[in-house]
């Protein structure tokens, strides 16, 4: 079908699934402490420790991704080999041939299960007209696999970071 557009945007559901591991871990930890009847000081410092090493970084990365993709809509038509991205101010349309580079950046803890922020990742597009576009995992959950399927090319990991913040230049 020629008019088959795939439409992506940040949704409440995507946000909740991204934040679920950190919320789940903190609730389980709290229940364990209450069930085992730890004293309040032990509970406070243990929760504070886990909030500082997992929950806070996760929330900061999440907010960074919302800043870049919160008001963005991406439409992709694989049959027409074109994409449109719409911001609050502008709309840009590109053919797949206009894409010079797709960089896939992920956390070095991706799929390790060690940290909640490890699941956050993004792709950076560079177009022939020097414009850039960043699409995050808040917008498209399995971003690398979806882009491989839609663009018909392998998306290799081109960078790893512990905390996968998007650079301000993007």
Image (cartoon, rainbow, N blue to C red):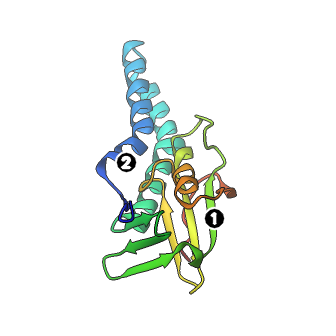
Q: Is residue 127 left or right of residue 62?
A: right
| Quadrant housing residue 101 | bottom right
Furthest toward the bottom, the residue is: 129
Tag 2–tag 1 contact (CB < 8 Å): no
In the structure shown, which secondary structural element does the residue marked by tag 1 occupy?
strand
For disc 1, the neighbor class at 10 Å (few under 14, some 14 to 19, many from 20) is some
Residue 18: horizontal and vertical position, in percent?
42, 45
Q: Nearer the viewer, residue 44 or 68?
A: 68
Q: Which residue is mark 1?
A: 103
The number of discs equals: 2
Residue 170: horizontal and vertical position, in percent?
54, 74
Q: Nearer the viewer, residue 53 or 104?
A: 104
**Residue visible at 63% across and 64% down in the picture:** 103
**Residue visible at 57% across and 71% down in the picture:** 125
Q: Could you say which disc has been placed on residue 17 in the image?
A: none
Residue 136: horizontal and vertical position, in percent?
48, 59
**Residue visible at 52% across and 57% down in the picture:** 150
Is the N terminus in the top left, top right, bottom left or bottom right quadrant? bottom left
In the structure shown, which secondary structural element does the residue marked by tag 2 occupy?
helix
Q: Is residue 53 above or below residue 154?
A: above
| Quadrant housing residue 166 | bottom right
For disc 2, the neighbor class at 10 Å (few under 14, some 14 to 19, many from 20) is some
Q: Is residue 65 above or below residue 145?
A: below
Q: Is residue 98 above or below residue 43?
A: below
Cα–Cα span, label 2 and label 1? 22 Å
Q: Could you say which disc has been placed on residue 14 in the image?
A: 2
Q: Is residue 130 above or below residue 140?
A: below
Q: Is residue 139 left or right of residue 52?
A: left
Q: Nearer the viewer, residue 23 or 100?
A: 100
């Amino acid at each position: 079908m020629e008019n088959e557009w795939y439409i992506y945007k940040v949704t409440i559901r995507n946000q909740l699934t991204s934040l679920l591991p950190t919320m789940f871990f903190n609730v389980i930890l709290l229940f364990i402490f209450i069930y085992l009847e730890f004293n309040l000081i032990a509970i406070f410092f243990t929760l504070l420790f886990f909030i500082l090493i997992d929950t806070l970084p996760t929330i900061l990365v999440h907010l960074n991704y919302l800043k870049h993709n919160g008001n963005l809509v991406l439409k992709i038509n694989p049959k027409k080999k074109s994409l449109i991205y719409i911001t609050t101010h502008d709309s840009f349309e590109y053919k797949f041939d206009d894409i010079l580079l797709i960089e896939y950046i992920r956390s070095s803890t991706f799929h390790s299960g060690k940290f909640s922020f490890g699941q956050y990742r993004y792709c950076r597009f560079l177009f022939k007209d020097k414009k850039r576009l960043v699409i995050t995992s808040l917008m498209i959950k399995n971003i690398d696999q979806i882009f491989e399927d839609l663009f018909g090319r392998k998306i290799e990991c081109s960078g790893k970071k512990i905390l996968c913040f998007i650079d301000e230049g993007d």
